[in-house]
Image (cartoon, rainbow, N blue to C red):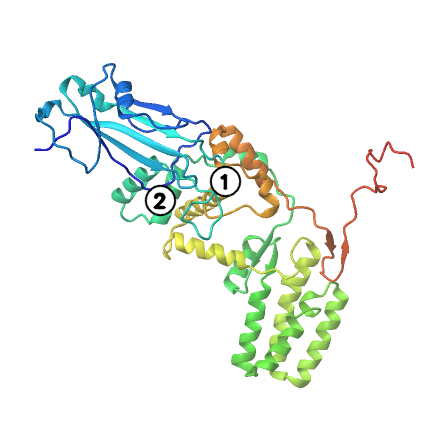
Amino acid sequence: MNETNGSEAETNSSGEDMSETNGSEERSFEIPGAIKLTIEDKFLSPEEVLALMHTHRPSAKNIPRGKRVPIEPQPAADAIIMFKQYYITLKRDPSYKRRISFLTQCPENMESMKNLAVVEYIGAFCQKPEPHGNSKKTTSECVRTSCTVKRKLEEMTETNKALAPRDIYEHMENLRDVKQFCTPTQISQIGTQISQIVIGSDEEVALLKAIKQCFPAAVQVLCTRHLEENVRRYLTNKVGLDDKSRKTIISKIFGKNRLILCNSSKNFELTYIKLLDKFHKRLPSFKDYFIKIAEKIRSGVFQARLNNKWIPIDWKNSSCESMNHIIKLSTNWTSMKLPALVDRLYRIVKLQQIDCRRALYGEGNYELAPWMKKLKVSNVHWKQKTEEEKEQVFKKFMKGLPERKQVISSTDGLLSVPRTPKIARKPGQRKRVKNIRT
């Protein structure tokens, strides 16, 4: 029997990045009764660690693991002290190390020391946020997921097998949700909507009829991409044109400086008459369809943009198609009743707000745009803020506007001029304009 009446050193070089960083040199370790120390130059010796655990300094000899030295006479089993130590190095900074020391076996008079552990740190913690050591694409700072979140994820996957993994985080956040839409207070504050309703869609006949019946005063905007695809499909399947002729006709209707981009009623009518005369002579089979498509362009593109200057020149419903795909993924491509669908839409919007909120402090799958980088908050500072302060930062982010462009473009996109200063200034002028002498 080869036993050692002393301590056993054990090393754990996992290389994982340590967490729980709050700006101070001491870090928390989830062991009841743990003794936390910060040593700048070296770790404590095993005798010094045991002295911290017990007022009596036991006689112990440090024997490295794997090297057994037989001693005579052999000690009794109840007199052996088994002392283990684990070493962990911070991946982003190898000079910052942590050591955890604890007892696994000891005499009966030292039994209370089994519930104690000594946690030591060497070096200064790197406060600069950095990406994860194994990341290759993302440049955002690494934030370790807390143990409580992992436990909740495991419980939710075990109790609810039908729940998709992508919906777990959404369900966890909804526990703290406060309904923001359709509350009596907000409805009373909104009052009457003064601005005109503008609804964009494709050429689906059933949808256009429903919008016209439910919102007769609303402005209907048609997607130019769908209009162009429908014309291309008609020229291919009905008329039978070759690729070169088809591209020429489409460019005359949807190309630059063509029918769809006319900026006045006069230009629109002149362009329409020229194209109609040309199609009547060279392509009679396309004339009737062109009259129908030109009427849709007149009412759904040209007239809508003429009365509402803020509508883009070449509006497309690509964002609507993306949202439609997200809704179908959320419902697992199944039909739902209206109340359940409204609740699902609310949760999708809420999840998008959560993603925007997480981007503020460097978490999630999204990053702030370059012109909004000034609003970014480090993860450490975000956790130190109260809920009211976090809400103020998020509201400021939601009200943010893109930086001032250096060039101003006309509504039709044909003319661009440099932007002038808001107030005229002389070169080198420092004082306010109103008080300066000319």
Q: Position of residue 182 (x, y in %)?
A: 50, 39
Q: Total number of numbered labels? A: 2
Q: Is residue 421 left or right of residue 111?
A: right
Amino acid on which the number 1 mark rests in the picture: Arg
| Other residues around mark 1 within 10 Å, as few (<14) / some (14–19) / many (≥20) | many
Q: Is residue 360 visible?
A: yes
Of the 4 image quadrants, the one containing the N terminus is top left
Label 2 and label 1: CA atoms lie apart by 18 Å
The C terminus lies in which quarter of the figure?
Answer: top right
Looking at this view, is 204 or 57 the one in front? 57
Which is more toward the observer, 295 or 328?
Answer: 328
User: What residue occupies the far right of the structure in this picture?
Assistant: 438
Q: Nearer the viewer, residue 211 or 5?
A: 5
* Residue 185 visible here: no
* Local SS, label 2: helix
Amino acid type, callout 2 = Ile
Where does residue 67 sit, x and y in percent of width and height? Answer: 18, 36
Residue at the spot 65% in from the left edge and 57% down from the top edge: 312
Q: Residues within 10 Å of mark 2 (few under 14, many from 20)?
A: some
Which picture quadrant has residue 119? top left
Q: Is residue 413 above or below residue 401?
A: below
- Of the numbered discs in the image, which one, if any, rests on residue 357? 1
Residue annotated with mark 2: 168
Q: Earlier in the sequence, mark 2 or mark 1?
A: 2
**Position of residue 268 measured from the top left corner of the image (x, y, whole percent):** 72, 68
Residue 170's tag is none
